[in-house]
Amino acid sequence: MAIKKLRIATRRSQLAMVQTNWVKKELEEAHPNIDISVEAMATQGDKILDVALAKIGDKGLFTKELEAQMLIDRADIAVHSLKDLPTNLPEGLMLGCITEREDPADALVVNEKFKDKKLETLPLGSIVGTSSLRRLAQLRHHYPHLIFKDVRGNVITRLEKLDAGDYDCLILAAAGLTRLGFAERIHQLIPNEISLHAVGQGALGIECVYGKPEILEIIKALEHVQTSKRCLAERALLRELEGGCQVPIGVSSKVENQNLILTGMVASLDGKRLIRDTKSGDINNPETLGIELANALKNQGAMEILQEIFKEMRSEDQN
């Protein structure tokens, strides 16, 4: 039976709406006979803005409400920043499509007074805003002389805080800045040697109900094969390490011919211990490669670091 209507669930944030409207436009062009509508809502991660992300849970902060809409048949698909989508999805749902990736790098955005500085030349005691434990751990490892301060809110709110002088600089995803039209605010793209990006960063993931091939066929128009292979390898690494989006696990991936090259990193919160390794394999077996790299990191002590972090978080929660 031909689908006549498609309902998209998404977050209300400006970035989420920009991303979802792009998906809607692309699907309308691919399927002009389908009526496509968008239902936007606030998620737990959008509502709680006065607590660090790592302290309010690490799985499904920006996805659960959207997934509920699909499970009660009020939405057919949900559009996510793939980095926000947990690697283990609720029963009955699946990751149906991964779109072409924007630059997945982290970006340095600076206050006007530091326009002549780079990350490596920021002066002692500079205040760096980030809500990511992954960024925090890696930057502490390389730049222990900087001061790191949590920052919440959407991208525009964070930029306003930066310009008001609350921070000397921010670390944000280059992809989000670009999609929102703030590419000119990117002062420096942080190289992988300093900060590996989040799993799935820069790509969009379209989640759908399992067992509905007619929906899957529609959204596959947006599938980008190379991005999908890279992100599946990254997500397999994260899943094998049992890490949510708020633990210091970073990745990078690239494709050379039919070879997929995956680099992974696990670090302690203080940045003093950092484990990093690289594996390569057949592009057609991305998840096998992700598991292989995860096991290599485990053999070097990754699980001990992660268990210590979980213990610290539980201790903070109890206090």
Image (cartoon, helix red, strand yellow):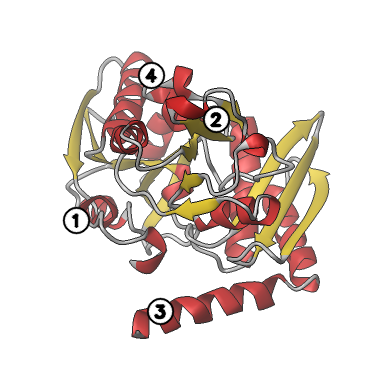
Separation of marks 1 and 4 at Cα, in angstroms? 35 Å
Please, what is the three-letter code of the amino acid marked with disc 4? Gly
- Earlier residue among tags 1 and 3: 1
Question: Where residue 32 appears, x then y in whole percent?
Answer: 29, 14
Q: Residue at (53%, 40%) from the top-left corner? A: 201
In the image, which disc is placed on residue 243?
A: none
Asked if labels 1 and 2 touch by Cβ distance under 8 angstroms, the answer is no
Mark 1, residues whose alpha carbon is within 10 Å: few (<14), some, or many (≥20)?
Answer: few
Q: Which residue is mark 4?
A: 181
- Earlier residue among tags 2 and 1: 1
Q: Residue at (38%, 64%) from the top-left corner? A: 91
Question: Where residue 160 appears, x then y in whole percent?
Answer: 30, 33
Please, what is the three-letter code of the amino acid marked with disc 1? Ile
Left or right: 155 in relation to 268: left
Asked if labels 4 and 1 touch by Cβ distance under 8 angstroms, the answer is no
- Earlier residue among tags 1 and 4: 1
- Which one is closest to the eye, mark 4 or mark 2? 4
Please, what is the three-letter code of the amino acid marked with disc 2? Arg
Separation of marks 4 and 2 at Cα, in angstroms? 16 Å
Left or right: 134 in relation to 28: right
- The quarter in which the C terminus is drawn is bottom left
Asked if one can make out residue 266 in the rendered structure from this viewpoint, the answer is: yes
Q: Which residue is mark 2?
A: 101
Please, what is the three-letter code of the amino acid marked with disc 3? Glu
Separation of marks 1 and 3 at Cα, in angstroms? 36 Å
- Earlier residue among tags 4 and 2: 2
- Earlier residue among tags 3 and 2: 2
Question: Where residue 289 appears, x then y in whole percent?
Answer: 75, 53
Asked if labels 2 and 3 touch by Cβ distance under 8 angstroms, the answer is no
